[in-house]
Amino acid sequence: MDDTTRVRQLRIVVEAEDYDAALAFFRDVLGLPEQESYAGDGGARVAILDAGRATLELANPAQKAMIDDVEVGRPVAPHIRLAFEVGDGRSVTARLVEAGAELIAPPTITPWNSLNSRLATPAELQVTVFQELDSTEP
């Protein structure tokens, strides 16, 4: 595949009923830098936030159920869930909860040695915050 036919960016587009609250949460609290923003006719607004490196994680129903079981202990994830890798999962989770996210499951060490928490956020998104642990971290 040559460079002209290769995908260059993954952009997830989310309709947020309360745009200002969602923008403040993801930009100001979670810390995703604003790359661009536009306003259009009829009050149309959009912000493009930089989420670092993007990957598309495809999971079959059994894997989705297993991740829910590990992170939360019960099936809760909708069809699409966002996951953000951070350097300090506990402090980022606390900061997001302080900003109004609903804690679904606290930071939990997974069998694949990451620290994962699950939250319900503005724009009706479920988010996993994960921290990759090295072999010496508890």
Image: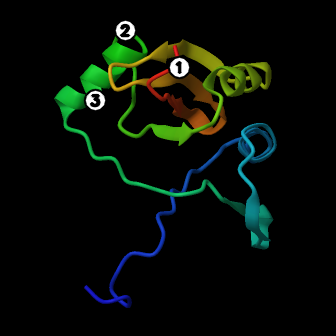
Q: Name the residue beneath numbered marker 1.
A: 137
Q: CA distance from mark 2 to mark 1?
A: 23 Å
User: Where is residue 37 drawn, in percent x and y?
Assistant: 76, 67
Does the image show residue 75? no
Q: How is the image coloured?
A: rainbow
From this view, report whether residue 11 is shown above or below residue 105.
below
Whether residue 67 can be seen here: yes
| Quadrant (top left/top right/bottom left/bottom right) for the N terminus | bottom left
Residue at the image position 34 percent from the left and 26 percent from the top? 112
Return the residue nearer the eye: 115 or 78: 115
**Whether label 1 touches label 3, CB < 8 Å:** no
Amino acid of disc 2: Gly
Labels 2 and 1: the sequence-earlier one: 2
**What kind of element bears circle 3?**
helix
User: In the image, residue 80 lies at what x, y percent?
Assistant: 40, 40
Mark 1 or mark 3, whichever is nearer to me: 1
Considering the numbered disc 2 on the image, is that residue within a helix, a strand or a loop?
loop
Check contact, mark 3 vs mark 2: CB within 8 A: no
| Helix, strand or loop status at disc 1 | loop
Q: How far is the residue under mark 3 from the one under mark 2?
A: 12 Å
What amino acid does circle 1 point to? Glu
Label ID, residue 64: 3
- Disc 1 to disc 3, C-alpha distance: 26 Å
Q: Dot 2 corresponds to which residue?
A: 73
